[in-house]
Image (cartoon, rainbow, N blue to C red):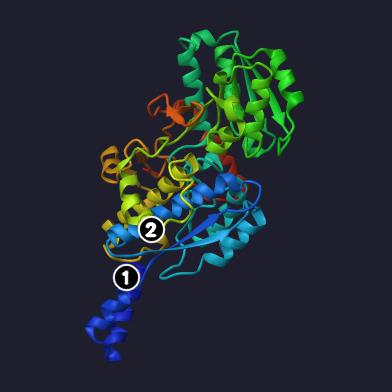
Amino acid sequence: MTKSMTRKLAAAGLGLIVGLTGMATAQAQSEEAQYLPSLVYRTGPYAPSGVGFADGFSDYVTLVNERDGGINGVPIELEECETAYSNDRGAECYERLKNRGDGDGATVMAPLSTGITYTLIPRTREDNIVLHTMGYGRADAAYGPVMDWVFMVPTTYWSSTTVTMQHIADQEGGWENLEGKTIVHAFHDSAYGREPLEVLRGYAEEYGFTLEEMAISPPGVEQRSVWTQIRRMQPDWISLFGWGVMNPTAIRTANSMGIDVSKIIGGIYAAQDDAVEPAGSAAEGYKAVTFHGPGSDYPVYDDLQEYVYDPGLAAGDGSQQGKIAYNRGLINAAYIIEAWRQAQQEFGEGEVMGREETKWAWNQLTITEERTEELGMKGLMPPVDVTCRDHEGGGLALIQQWNGESWEQVTDFMEPDMERVFPLYRESALEYAESEGVEVKECD
Protein backbone atom coordinates (compact mmCIF):
# COMPACT_ATOMS: atom_id res chain seq x y z
CA MET A 1 0.00 0.00 0.00
CA THR A 2 1.37 3.42 -0.95
CA LYS A 3 1.82 6.31 1.43
CA SER A 4 -0.86 8.32 -0.37
CA MET A 5 -3.33 5.44 0.01
CA THR A 6 -2.48 5.11 3.71
CA ARG A 7 -3.13 8.81 4.23
CA LYS A 8 -6.47 8.57 2.44
CA LEU A 9 -7.59 5.58 4.52
CA ALA A 10 -6.58 7.38 7.69
CA ALA A 11 -8.52 10.46 6.62
CA ALA A 12 -11.59 8.33 5.85
CA GLY A 13 -11.34 6.65 9.25
CA LEU A 14 -11.11 9.99 11.01
CA GLY A 15 -14.17 11.12 9.09
CA LEU A 16 -16.17 8.21 10.48
CA ILE A 17 -14.98 8.91 14.02
CA VAL A 18 -16.12 12.52 13.96
CA GLY A 19 -19.38 11.57 12.28
CA LEU A 20 -18.85 12.88 8.74
CA THR A 21 -21.28 11.56 6.20
CA GLY A 22 -20.18 9.43 3.27
CA MET A 23 -21.05 12.29 0.94
CA ALA A 24 -18.82 14.71 2.83
CA THR A 25 -15.95 12.20 2.80
CA ALA A 26 -16.29 11.70 -0.96
CA GLN A 27 -16.36 15.45 -1.48
CA ALA A 28 -13.18 15.90 0.54
CA GLN A 29 -11.44 13.20 -1.47
CA SER A 30 -12.54 14.69 -4.78
CA GLU A 31 -10.90 17.97 -3.80
CA GLU A 32 -7.46 16.34 -3.58
CA ALA A 33 -5.27 17.26 -6.52
CA GLN A 34 -2.04 16.16 -8.13
CA TYR A 35 0.30 19.11 -7.59
CA LEU A 36 2.44 20.24 -10.53
CA PRO A 37 4.94 23.08 -10.12
CA SER A 38 5.92 24.85 -13.32
CA LEU A 39 9.25 26.69 -13.41
CA VAL A 40 8.91 29.29 -16.15
CA TYR A 41 10.72 32.29 -17.58
CA ARG A 42 8.11 34.66 -18.92
CA THR A 43 10.48 37.55 -18.18
CA GLY A 44 14.17 38.18 -18.72
CA PRO A 45 16.43 38.01 -21.78
CA TYR A 46 15.17 34.59 -22.91
CA ALA A 47 11.46 35.30 -22.48
CA PRO A 48 10.78 34.93 -26.24
CA SER A 49 11.54 31.22 -25.78
CA GLY A 50 10.02 30.87 -22.33
CA VAL A 51 6.58 32.39 -22.86
CA GLY A 52 5.51 29.91 -25.53
CA PHE A 53 6.64 26.92 -23.53
CA ALA A 54 4.88 28.12 -20.38
CA ASP A 55 1.65 28.74 -22.31
CA GLY A 56 1.70 25.29 -23.93
CA PHE A 57 2.47 23.55 -20.65
CA SER A 58 -0.36 25.34 -18.86
CA ASP A 59 -2.88 24.88 -21.68
CA TYR A 60 -2.33 21.12 -21.81
CA VAL A 61 -2.93 20.83 -18.05
CA THR A 62 -6.11 22.90 -18.48
CA LEU A 63 -7.20 20.62 -21.33
CA VAL A 64 -6.82 17.48 -19.22
CA ASN A 65 -8.69 19.06 -16.32
CA GLU A 66 -11.54 20.47 -18.44
CA ARG A 67 -11.97 17.62 -20.94
CA ASP A 68 -11.15 14.61 -18.74
CA GLY A 69 -11.79 15.87 -15.23
CA GLY A 70 -8.10 15.35 -14.49
CA ILE A 71 -6.32 12.00 -14.35
CA ASN A 72 -9.03 9.42 -13.63
CA GLY A 73 -10.85 12.07 -11.63
CA VAL A 74 -7.79 13.56 -9.94
CA PRO A 75 -7.46 17.23 -10.98
CA ILE A 76 -4.03 18.68 -11.61
CA GLU A 77 -3.10 21.75 -9.58
CA LEU A 78 -0.62 23.83 -11.58
CA GLU A 79 1.45 26.55 -9.96
CA GLU A 80 3.94 28.66 -11.90
CA CYS A 81 7.08 30.17 -10.45
CA GLU A 82 9.06 32.79 -12.40
CA THR A 83 12.78 32.07 -12.69
CA ALA A 84 13.71 34.62 -15.40
CA TYR A 85 16.14 31.85 -16.45
CA SER A 86 18.27 32.60 -13.36
CA ASN A 87 19.90 29.69 -11.51
CA ASP A 88 19.41 31.37 -8.13
CA ARG A 89 15.75 32.10 -8.76
CA GLY A 90 15.25 28.57 -10.07
CA ALA A 91 16.63 27.17 -6.82
CA GLU A 92 14.38 29.52 -4.82
CA CYS A 93 11.34 28.36 -6.78
CA TYR A 94 12.23 24.73 -6.16
CA GLU A 95 12.57 25.17 -2.40
CA ARG A 96 9.38 27.21 -2.20
CA LEU A 97 7.23 24.78 -4.18
CA LYS A 98 8.58 21.32 -3.44
CA ASN A 99 6.37 20.66 -0.39
CA ARG A 100 3.20 22.39 -1.56
CA GLY A 101 0.01 20.65 -2.65
CA ASP A 102 -1.67 17.45 -1.50
CA GLY A 103 0.06 14.19 -0.66
CA ASP A 104 3.83 14.36 -1.03
CA GLY A 105 3.61 17.76 -2.68
CA ALA A 106 5.79 18.08 -5.76
CA THR A 107 6.72 14.72 -7.25
CA VAL A 108 8.23 15.96 -10.52
CA MET A 109 10.00 19.14 -11.62
CA ALA A 110 10.76 20.41 -15.13
CA PRO A 111 13.35 23.18 -14.61
CA LEU A 112 13.43 24.40 -18.24
CA SER A 113 17.09 25.41 -17.97
CA THR A 114 20.38 23.54 -18.17
CA GLY A 115 21.89 25.76 -15.48
CA ILE A 116 18.96 25.26 -13.10
CA THR A 117 19.08 21.53 -13.87
CA TYR A 118 22.69 21.30 -12.67
CA THR A 119 21.67 23.15 -9.50
CA LEU A 120 18.68 20.91 -8.82
CA ILE A 121 20.13 17.46 -9.57
CA PRO A 122 21.57 16.95 -6.06
CA ARG A 123 18.53 18.52 -4.38
CA THR A 124 15.99 16.39 -6.20
CA ARG A 125 18.06 13.32 -5.45
CA GLU A 126 17.89 14.10 -1.72
CA ASP A 127 14.16 14.88 -1.88
CA ASN A 128 13.31 11.89 -4.14
CA ILE A 129 11.67 14.15 -6.73
CA VAL A 130 11.76 13.24 -10.42
CA LEU A 131 13.63 15.75 -12.59
CA HIS A 132 12.42 15.85 -16.20
CA THR A 133 14.88 17.68 -18.47
CA MET A 134 13.34 17.37 -21.93
CA GLY A 135 16.09 17.84 -24.50
CA TYR A 136 18.41 19.82 -22.21
CA GLY A 137 20.48 19.42 -19.04
CA ARG A 138 23.05 16.67 -18.49
CA ALA A 139 23.03 14.29 -21.43
CA ASP A 140 24.68 11.58 -19.30
CA ALA A 141 21.54 11.49 -17.13
CA ALA A 142 20.21 9.25 -19.89
CA TYR A 143 22.22 6.47 -18.18
CA GLY A 144 19.61 5.40 -15.62
CA PRO A 145 21.76 3.26 -13.27
CA VAL A 146 23.49 6.42 -12.02
CA MET A 147 20.88 9.20 -12.06
CA ASP A 148 17.78 7.11 -11.52
CA TRP A 149 15.69 10.18 -10.64
CA VAL A 150 16.59 12.24 -13.77
CA PHE A 151 14.95 11.67 -17.17
CA MET A 152 15.92 13.07 -20.58
CA VAL A 153 12.73 12.05 -22.42
CA PRO A 154 12.56 12.12 -25.42
CA THR A 155 16.14 13.00 -26.49
CA THR A 156 19.44 14.66 -25.56
CA TYR A 157 21.86 17.08 -27.16
CA TRP A 158 24.11 14.14 -28.01
CA SER A 159 21.46 11.95 -29.62
CA SER A 160 20.00 14.86 -31.58
CA THR A 161 23.49 15.70 -32.85
CA THR A 162 23.79 12.18 -34.30
CA VAL A 163 20.50 12.79 -36.14
CA THR A 164 21.91 16.05 -37.53
CA MET A 165 25.01 14.19 -38.71
CA GLN A 166 22.90 11.44 -40.28
CA HIS A 167 20.99 14.10 -42.23
CA ILE A 168 24.25 15.66 -43.43
CA ALA A 169 25.53 12.24 -44.52
CA ASP A 170 22.26 11.57 -46.35
CA GLN A 171 22.53 14.91 -48.17
CA GLU A 172 26.10 14.08 -49.18
CA GLY A 173 25.12 10.67 -50.52
CA GLY A 174 26.63 8.60 -47.74
CA TRP A 175 29.04 8.71 -44.81
CA GLU A 176 31.98 7.90 -47.06
CA ASN A 177 31.47 11.20 -48.87
CA LEU A 178 32.21 13.24 -45.73
CA GLU A 179 35.93 12.64 -46.12
CA GLY A 180 37.71 15.88 -46.91
CA LYS A 181 34.68 18.04 -46.07
CA THR A 182 34.68 20.88 -43.54
CA ILE A 183 32.02 21.14 -40.85
CA VAL A 184 31.92 24.12 -38.48
CA HIS A 185 30.41 23.96 -35.01
CA ALA A 186 29.46 27.56 -34.13
CA PHE A 187 28.40 27.55 -30.52
CA HIS A 188 27.30 29.59 -27.53
CA ASP A 189 30.45 29.73 -25.41
CA SER A 190 29.03 27.81 -22.46
CA ALA A 191 28.58 24.27 -21.22
CA TYR A 192 25.43 24.11 -23.35
CA GLY A 193 27.24 25.10 -26.55
CA ARG A 194 30.06 22.65 -25.92
CA GLU A 195 27.72 19.70 -25.27
CA PRO A 196 27.96 18.15 -28.81
CA LEU A 197 31.72 18.54 -29.22
CA GLU A 198 32.74 15.07 -28.10
CA VAL A 199 30.19 13.51 -30.46
CA LEU A 200 31.27 15.70 -33.38
CA ARG A 201 34.96 15.03 -32.74
CA GLY A 202 34.29 11.31 -32.84
CA TYR A 203 32.58 11.61 -36.22
CA ALA A 204 35.40 13.77 -37.60
CA GLU A 205 38.01 11.22 -36.59
CA GLU A 206 36.05 8.29 -38.00
CA TYR A 207 34.95 9.81 -41.31
CA GLY A 208 37.88 12.09 -42.11
CA PHE A 209 36.26 15.52 -42.24
CA THR A 210 37.68 18.68 -40.68
CA LEU A 211 35.80 19.96 -37.63
CA GLU A 212 36.23 23.67 -36.94
CA GLU A 213 35.11 24.78 -33.47
CA MET A 214 33.99 28.42 -33.32
CA ALA A 215 32.95 29.76 -29.92
CA ILE A 216 30.66 32.81 -29.83
CA SER A 217 30.65 34.88 -26.65
CA PRO A 218 27.15 35.32 -25.19
CA PRO A 219 24.83 37.03 -25.63
CA GLY A 220 26.05 37.09 -29.23
CA VAL A 221 24.72 40.43 -30.44
CA GLU A 222 27.90 41.03 -32.49
CA GLN A 223 29.29 38.10 -34.50
CA ARG A 224 30.79 39.63 -37.64
CA SER A 225 34.38 38.69 -36.83
CA VAL A 226 33.40 35.06 -36.16
CA TRP A 227 31.44 34.69 -39.39
CA THR A 228 34.21 36.39 -41.35
CA GLN A 229 36.49 33.57 -40.19
CA ILE A 230 33.87 30.95 -40.99
CA ARG A 231 33.42 32.33 -44.52
CA ARG A 232 37.16 31.98 -45.12
CA MET A 233 36.93 28.31 -44.13
CA GLN A 234 34.34 27.71 -46.88
CA PRO A 235 32.55 25.07 -44.82
CA ASP A 236 30.34 22.44 -46.38
CA TRP A 237 28.03 22.40 -43.35
CA ILE A 238 27.57 24.40 -40.16
CA SER A 239 26.21 23.19 -36.84
CA LEU A 240 24.72 26.12 -34.89
CA PHE A 241 24.29 25.71 -31.14
CA GLY A 242 22.99 29.14 -30.24
CA TRP A 243 20.61 30.49 -27.64
CA GLY A 244 18.44 33.58 -27.48
CA VAL A 245 19.49 36.56 -29.57
CA MET A 246 22.57 34.69 -30.78
CA ASN A 247 20.52 32.58 -33.20
CA PRO A 248 18.87 35.23 -35.43
CA THR A 249 22.06 37.29 -35.28
CA ALA A 250 24.06 34.31 -36.55
CA ILE A 251 21.61 33.62 -39.36
CA ARG A 252 21.44 37.27 -40.48
CA THR A 253 25.22 37.68 -40.35
CA ALA A 254 25.90 34.44 -42.23
CA ASN A 255 23.40 35.39 -44.93
CA SER A 256 24.88 38.87 -45.31
CA MET A 257 28.26 37.27 -46.03
CA GLY A 258 26.93 35.03 -48.75
CA ILE A 259 26.88 31.83 -46.68
CA ASP A 260 24.13 29.44 -47.78
CA VAL A 261 21.86 29.20 -44.70
CA SER A 262 20.36 25.94 -46.00
CA LYS A 263 23.74 24.44 -45.05
CA ILE A 264 23.29 25.59 -41.44
CA ILE A 265 21.58 23.11 -39.11
CA GLY A 266 20.66 24.46 -35.71
CA GLY A 267 20.61 22.46 -32.51
CA ILE A 268 17.51 21.92 -30.37
CA TYR A 269 17.50 25.46 -28.97
CA ALA A 270 18.26 27.03 -32.32
CA ALA A 271 15.10 25.39 -33.66
CA GLN A 272 12.45 27.71 -32.23
CA ASP A 273 10.56 30.53 -33.90
CA ASP A 274 12.55 33.18 -32.04
CA ALA A 275 15.62 31.93 -33.94
CA VAL A 276 14.19 32.70 -37.36
CA GLU A 277 11.43 35.31 -37.17
CA PRO A 278 13.75 38.18 -36.12
CA ALA A 279 16.11 37.24 -38.98
CA GLY A 280 13.43 37.96 -41.57
CA SER A 281 14.00 36.74 -45.13
CA ALA A 282 17.63 35.87 -44.30
CA ALA A 283 16.38 32.76 -42.46
CA GLU A 284 14.58 31.17 -45.42
CA GLY A 285 16.00 27.68 -45.99
CA TYR A 286 17.61 27.41 -42.55
CA LYS A 287 17.32 23.95 -40.94
CA ALA A 288 17.28 22.72 -37.36
CA VAL A 289 16.95 19.49 -35.40
CA THR A 290 14.08 19.05 -32.96
CA PHE A 291 12.21 16.29 -31.12
CA HIS A 292 8.59 16.95 -32.07
CA GLY A 293 6.46 17.96 -35.00
CA PRO A 294 5.99 21.62 -36.00
CA GLY A 295 2.75 23.52 -36.47
CA SER A 296 -0.78 22.87 -35.22
CA ASP A 297 -2.18 20.27 -37.64
CA TYR A 298 -2.86 17.69 -34.93
CA PRO A 299 -6.19 16.57 -33.38
CA VAL A 300 -5.11 17.76 -29.92
CA TYR A 301 -5.45 21.32 -31.23
CA ASP A 302 -9.13 20.68 -31.97
CA ASP A 303 -9.61 19.70 -28.33
CA LEU A 304 -7.63 22.72 -27.17
CA GLN A 305 -9.90 24.94 -29.25
CA GLU A 306 -13.05 23.43 -27.74
CA TYR A 307 -12.02 23.10 -24.10
CA VAL A 308 -9.37 25.79 -23.59
CA TYR A 309 -9.32 28.53 -26.25
CA ASP A 310 -13.05 29.04 -26.89
CA PRO A 311 -13.99 29.14 -23.17
CA GLY A 312 -11.27 31.75 -22.59
CA LEU A 313 -9.09 29.52 -20.42
CA ALA A 314 -5.85 29.80 -22.41
CA ALA A 315 -2.74 30.86 -20.54
CA GLY A 316 -1.56 33.46 -23.03
CA ASP A 317 -2.87 35.81 -25.71
CA GLY A 318 -2.98 33.10 -28.40
CA SER A 319 0.10 34.30 -30.26
CA GLN A 320 2.18 31.26 -29.28
CA GLN A 321 -0.20 28.50 -30.37
CA GLY A 322 1.35 26.19 -32.96
CA LYS A 323 4.84 27.56 -32.46
CA ILE A 324 7.81 25.38 -31.56
CA ALA A 325 8.14 26.48 -27.93
CA TYR A 326 4.38 26.08 -27.38
CA ASN A 327 4.43 22.55 -28.80
CA ARG A 328 7.30 21.71 -26.47
CA GLY A 329 5.22 22.86 -23.54
CA LEU A 330 2.34 20.67 -24.69
CA ILE A 331 4.38 17.49 -24.97
CA ASN A 332 6.34 18.14 -21.78
CA ALA A 333 3.10 18.30 -19.82
CA ALA A 334 1.81 15.24 -21.70
CA TYR A 335 4.82 13.10 -20.70
CA ILE A 336 4.40 14.10 -17.06
CA ILE A 337 0.66 13.39 -17.04
CA GLU A 338 1.05 10.07 -18.85
CA ALA A 339 3.58 8.97 -16.22
CA TRP A 340 1.07 9.74 -13.48
CA ARG A 341 -1.63 7.90 -15.43
CA GLN A 342 0.57 4.82 -15.64
CA ALA A 343 1.42 5.13 -11.95
CA GLN A 344 -2.30 5.10 -11.16
CA GLN A 345 -2.73 1.90 -13.18
CA GLU A 346 -0.25 0.23 -10.85
CA PHE A 347 -1.06 1.84 -7.49
CA GLY A 348 -4.71 2.82 -7.69
CA GLU A 349 -6.83 4.81 -10.14
CA GLY A 350 -8.21 8.02 -8.72
CA GLU A 351 -5.34 8.32 -6.22
CA VAL A 352 -2.88 11.17 -5.81
CA MET A 353 0.51 9.70 -6.68
CA GLY A 354 3.43 10.25 -4.30
CA ARG A 355 7.12 10.52 -5.01
CA GLU A 356 7.87 6.79 -4.94
CA GLU A 357 4.95 6.00 -7.24
CA THR A 358 5.91 8.77 -9.64
CA LYS A 359 9.53 7.67 -9.80
CA TRP A 360 8.46 4.07 -10.38
CA ALA A 361 6.32 5.16 -13.34
CA TRP A 362 9.06 7.22 -14.94
CA ASN A 363 11.49 4.31 -14.74
CA GLN A 364 9.24 2.32 -17.07
CA LEU A 365 7.34 5.01 -18.92
CA THR A 366 6.05 3.60 -22.21
CA ILE A 367 4.13 5.72 -24.71
CA THR A 368 3.52 3.87 -27.94
CA GLU A 369 2.71 5.44 -31.28
CA GLU A 370 -0.84 4.16 -30.79
CA ARG A 371 -1.03 6.03 -27.50
CA THR A 372 0.19 9.27 -29.09
CA GLU A 373 -2.65 8.86 -31.61
CA GLU A 374 -5.16 8.40 -28.79
CA LEU A 375 -3.86 11.62 -27.26
CA GLY A 376 -4.34 13.43 -30.57
CA MET A 377 -0.59 13.98 -30.74
CA LYS A 378 0.62 11.48 -33.34
CA GLY A 379 3.47 13.08 -35.24
CA LEU A 380 3.70 15.85 -32.66
CA MET A 381 4.86 13.78 -29.71
CA PRO A 382 7.44 11.04 -30.30
CA PRO A 383 6.80 7.64 -28.68
CA VAL A 384 9.15 6.69 -25.87
CA ASP A 385 10.18 3.51 -24.08
CA VAL A 386 12.03 4.26 -20.84
CA THR A 387 13.81 1.53 -18.89
CA CYS A 388 15.90 1.38 -15.75
CA ARG A 389 18.97 1.55 -18.00
CA ASP A 390 17.74 4.03 -20.62
CA HIS A 391 16.30 7.29 -19.27
CA GLU A 392 16.13 8.85 -22.71
CA GLY A 393 13.48 6.51 -24.02
CA GLY A 394 14.67 6.18 -27.60
CA GLY A 395 16.12 9.57 -28.52
CA LEU A 396 14.01 10.18 -31.65
CA ALA A 397 14.49 13.50 -33.45
CA LEU A 398 13.74 15.05 -36.84
CA ILE A 399 14.95 17.81 -39.14
CA GLN A 400 12.74 20.80 -39.95
CA GLN A 401 13.28 23.74 -42.34
CA TRP A 402 12.06 27.34 -42.26
CA ASN A 403 10.24 28.32 -45.46
CA GLY A 404 10.10 32.02 -44.64
CA GLU A 405 6.75 31.83 -42.88
CA SER A 406 6.64 28.53 -41.01
CA TRP A 407 8.56 25.36 -40.23
CA GLU A 408 8.27 22.39 -42.56
CA GLN A 409 9.19 18.90 -41.43
CA VAL A 410 11.74 17.53 -43.93
CA THR A 411 12.43 14.13 -42.33
CA ASP A 412 10.47 11.59 -40.34
CA PHE A 413 11.47 10.92 -36.76
CA MET A 414 14.95 9.40 -36.99
CA GLU A 415 16.67 7.06 -34.56
CA PRO A 416 19.93 8.33 -33.05
CA ASP A 417 23.24 6.50 -33.21
CA MET A 418 22.92 4.80 -29.83
CA GLU A 419 25.98 2.64 -30.44
CA ARG A 420 27.95 5.87 -30.44
CA VAL A 421 26.30 7.87 -27.67
CA PHE A 422 25.28 5.30 -25.07
CA PRO A 423 28.88 4.35 -24.16
CA LEU A 424 29.53 8.09 -23.77
CA TYR A 425 26.53 8.41 -21.46
CA ARG A 426 27.76 5.52 -19.36
CA GLU A 427 31.35 6.70 -19.10
CA SER A 428 30.38 10.25 -18.15
CA ALA A 429 27.67 9.13 -15.71
CA LEU A 430 30.00 6.72 -13.91
CA GLU A 431 32.54 9.52 -13.51
CA TYR A 432 29.77 11.63 -11.97
CA ALA A 433 28.77 8.78 -9.64
CA GLU A 434 32.34 8.40 -8.41
CA SER A 435 32.83 12.13 -7.83
CA GLU A 436 29.46 12.64 -6.10
CA GLY A 437 29.27 9.38 -4.16
CA VAL A 438 26.17 8.17 -6.00
CA GLU A 439 25.46 4.46 -5.70
CA VAL A 440 25.15 2.82 -9.11
CA LYS A 441 21.80 1.03 -9.42
CA GLU A 442 21.50 -2.58 -10.58
CA CYS A 443 19.34 -2.95 -13.70
CA ASP A 444 17.97 -6.17 -15.17
Q: Residue at point 49% right, 15% down?
A: 169
Q: Nearer the viewer, mark 1 or mark 2?
A: 2
Residue type pointed to by label 2:
Thr
Query: Image check: 148 left or right of 274?
Result: left
Residue type pointed to by label 1:
Met
User: Picture coordinates of residue 426 (x, y %)?
Assistant: 51, 36
Let me know if residue 320 appears in the view.
yes
User: Picture coordinates of residue 1 (x, y %)?
Assistant: 30, 67
Q: Nearer the viewer, residue 337 or 361?
A: 337
**Label 1 Cα neighbours within 10 Å, binned few <14 / some 14-19 / many ≥20:** some
Task: Specify which label sits upstream in the sequence, 1 or 2.
Answer: 1
Q: In this view, does 326 lie above or below 342?
A: above
Q: Residue at point 34% right, 35% down?
A: 379
Residue 309 lies in what quarter of the image?
A: bottom left
User: Picture coordinates of residue 162 (x, y %)?
Assistant: 50, 26
Cα distance between the residues tagged 1 and 2: 26 Å
* Residue on which the image places disc 1: 5
Q: Residue at point 46% right, 11% down?
A: 174
Q: Is residue 187 above or below residue 51?
A: above
Q: In this view, does 138 lie above or below 166?
A: below
Residue 74 lies in what quarter of the image?
A: bottom left
Let me know if residue 186 appears in the view.
no
**What mark, if any, has residue 62 been given in the picture?**
2
